[in-house]
Image (cartoon, rainbow, N blue to C red):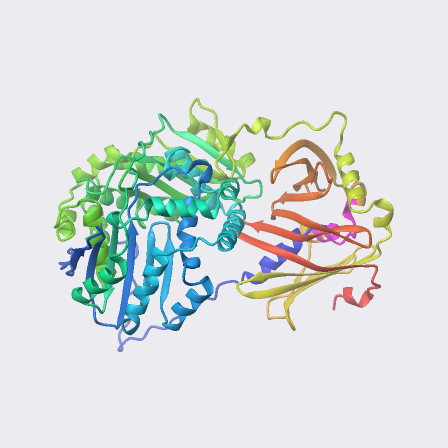
Amino acid sequence: MKKNILIALFFALITLPPSLLAQSKKTSGKQTQELDRSIRPQPGPAPVINIGKYESFTLDNGLQVFVVENNKIPRVSYSLIIDYTPVAEGPLAGMAELTGQILRTGTTTMTKEQLDEEIDFIGATLYTNSNGLYASGLKKHNEKLMQLMSDVLLNPSFDTAEFEKIRTRNISALEAAKTEPSSISERVGKKLLYGESHPYGETMTEKSLKNLTADHTRAFYSAFFKPQISYMAIVGDITVTEAKELMNKYFGIWQKGEVVNNPPADPKLPASNTVVIVDRPDAVQTTLALGYPVELTYGSEDVIKARVTNTILGGGTFRLYENLREKNGFTYGAYSRLSADKYIGKFGVQTEIRNTVTDSAINEILSEMKRLREETVPEDELSLAKNYISGGFALSLENPQTVANFAINTARYDLPKDYYVNYLKNLSLVSAADVKVMAEKYILPNSNYILAVGKASEIKDRLKPFAGNKPIRYFDFEGNEYDPDKKVKEAPAGMTAEDVNNAYINAIGGAKALEKIKSQTITATTSMQGMTIGFDIYKKAPNKYMMKIGAGEMVFQKIVFNGTEGMIFSPMGGENKKLEGDELEEMKLEAQLVPELKYKESGITLKLDGIETVNSKDAYKVTYTKPSGKTSVRYFDTQSNLLVKEVSDQGTIEYNDYREVEKLKFPFKIKQAMGPQMIELDVLTVKINDKLSDDLFVIE
C-alpha cells in the first residue's frame, strides 16, 4: 500500500504560493526616485557607544554575581552559567544534556506539576539546561522566583519516571532528525572536525540514551554543578543591595566541591581536503558544509581581526552570498563562520545547493577563500564590513542582558577589563593588511572537511576531484563510517526480486485473498501545527480511486480518478487541475487495489540489489523501474517479509505497526520525510469490500 502520492499531494495542498503585495508610494507632489541597487552604499562613520554599567560581588561559596539595574519595566531576569570543562561521555553521550533537562522536572519538595503551577501562578518563566538555568518574572514576585530557582538548582529529585519521559522524547527527536539534512550535517560535521573522543565531537544516539539512567544524571550533577565555577547575571528592576541579600539567602547554601578540570586535547587539521558523503537517496538538493578546527580562543588579539575577515568572506550578505546566490544562482544563501572558543575554535561554510551544481559551488567557495588570502581587500569593502559589525554591536547594547554577558565573558575568559569599552576602537583600527594576515592564518582552502549530505549517486562523481588521491568517505546519520561497496550484502544464491515480491504478498495475506478485494476504504490522520488533518481514501476494482483531505467539515482537497481520467479539486479556492502525462500514469498505478499483483502487466520491472540494514534489521533491497523510467527502492524485512521502507523522488517512507484486518495485514503507522518535513500518518480504520458507490468516483 503506497502513500507517495497521498503525502505529496498533501504538501501541494498546504504549500500556498506567496502573495504579491503592491505598496503605493506617496510623495508630496514629487516623483519618488528609484534606488540604484548597482551602486554599493557608502559606509558611514562607526557610532560612538557607551557600555552600560554593572556591579558585581562574589558569594562566600565562590559564585560570581553581576547586576545590571534597569527599572524601565518591573521585571527581573536571572541567567546562571556553570562553566565546567567539557568532558567526553563516550557510551553515555547525552548525559550532560539530559541532566540539564531533568532539573526542570521536579524537586525533593515539589513534583513537576506542582513546580509548573507555582511558576505559572506568578507569571514567570524558568528553564534549565546542561550549563545552568534562566528565569524571569515580575519584580513583585522576585523573592518567590528566587525560592523556586534555588529549589530547582539545589534540590533536584532525579525522578526515574520523569527521566524515562525525557529519554523517550529525545529518542523521538533523534528519529525526526534522521531526515533533517541540517541536523545530519551538524552531527557528522562535529565528529569530523573534533574526533569522536573529543567532547565537542560527541552526539547522543539511541544506543547511548538507552545506556543512561537517572542515576547517571544525578552523578553528573554532583560532579559538575558547583558554585565556584559559576556566574549569575541579574538584569532588571533590582538594586545591587537587594540582589546581594537575595543571593546570599537562596544561593549562599550552595556547597563548593572539587571539580575535574582536564581540558580536551586539540583536534588536528586534515592534511588535505577530505570529502565525506552522507547518502540520502531521496534528496533533490545537497546540504553542503566545509570546515576545520582553528586555534582561536577568546581573548586572543586575533579575535576582532578574524571577525572582520570572516565577515568579508561570508559573515553576512558578502562575498560568498554575492557569488553563489547573486552571481551564479546556485543557492538562496551561503555563509561562513569563524568562531572563537575557550578551548578550540572552528571555521565553517554552510549552504544548500542543487545536486547538479555541487562541484561548481565548491569551486566557487574555495576560490573565494583563496582570493581573500591572495588579494588585498578594497578599502570600501573593508569599511562596509567594519560598519556592519559595529552596527550589530551597537544594537546589541539596547538589551541590558548584553551588558551582563559582557561582564561574565570578561571574568570567564580573563579578558582585559576594558575589552568591550575599546571594542569599536579596536575594530576601527583593523586594516586591509590585517585582513590578509588573518586570511593566511585562518582561511585554509586546502585543509577542509567537505561534507555533502545528499544523493550519493548524483553527487559522488562531482565530488571526486576535491578528494585528490584519497577515496571519498561515507558516513551514516550517527557519524559511523562505512564502505559503500559493502553496505549492501549479497542476497541468498538464486533468490530473485520476484521471490521477494511473492514473499511479501504471502506475508500480507496471500494472492488468493488479495484477489478477492473489490473495494477498500482507509481513514487516517496526521497532526500539523496543532491541527488534525484527516484523510479518506477509497479504491474500487478495477482501478477507481478517490482521496479526500480535510479537517472536520472542511475539505481542503479531493483527488478523483474514474479509471480513465483524473482531477484534483481544491474546494478552498485553489485551482482545479486535470491529471495529465506522468501524473496521470502515476495515478493509474496508485489506483490499483493491489499493485504488487500486477507489476508485469503494468510494465514495472524489479531488480534485487541485495540485503541492506534498515533500522538495525536486515532487509531485501529491490529497485522498481516504471515504464516512464522513474525508479524507486523498496526494503522488505528478511524475517517478516513485510515492506518497511521505500525511497523515491517523492521522499522516504517508513511502514510500521502492521495489523490484521479480515486476515490481511496493513501498516497502521506511516512516516514520510520530504526534505526537512516529517509527516507521521496514523491509520484509524481499514475496511474491505464495503460496497462503495460509483458516485464517489464521478468527475464533475
**Residue found at the far top of this picture:** 469
Point out residue 37 in the picture as x, y percentages from the top left corner. Answer: 30, 56
Specify start and end residues of the magenta stretch as a single range.
585-596
Q: Is residue 586 magenta?
A: yes
Against 411, is 566 above or below?
A: below
Direction from residue 461 to residue 141 in the image, left or right: left
Residue 49: name its quadrant.
Answer: bottom left
Where is residue 454? Give x, y as percent: 51, 40
**Which residue: 48% across, 63% down?**
18
Q: Quick one: 61 or 77, which is closer to the camera? A: 61
Residue 473 percent across, percent down from the top left = 48, 29
Q: Quadrant of the C terminus?
A: bottom right
User: Is-magenta flag for residue 508?
Assistant: no
* Residue found 46% across the figure and 37% down from its top: 91
The image shows residue 149 at horizontal and vertical percentages of: 33, 61
Q: Nearer the viewer, residue 213 or 528?
A: 213
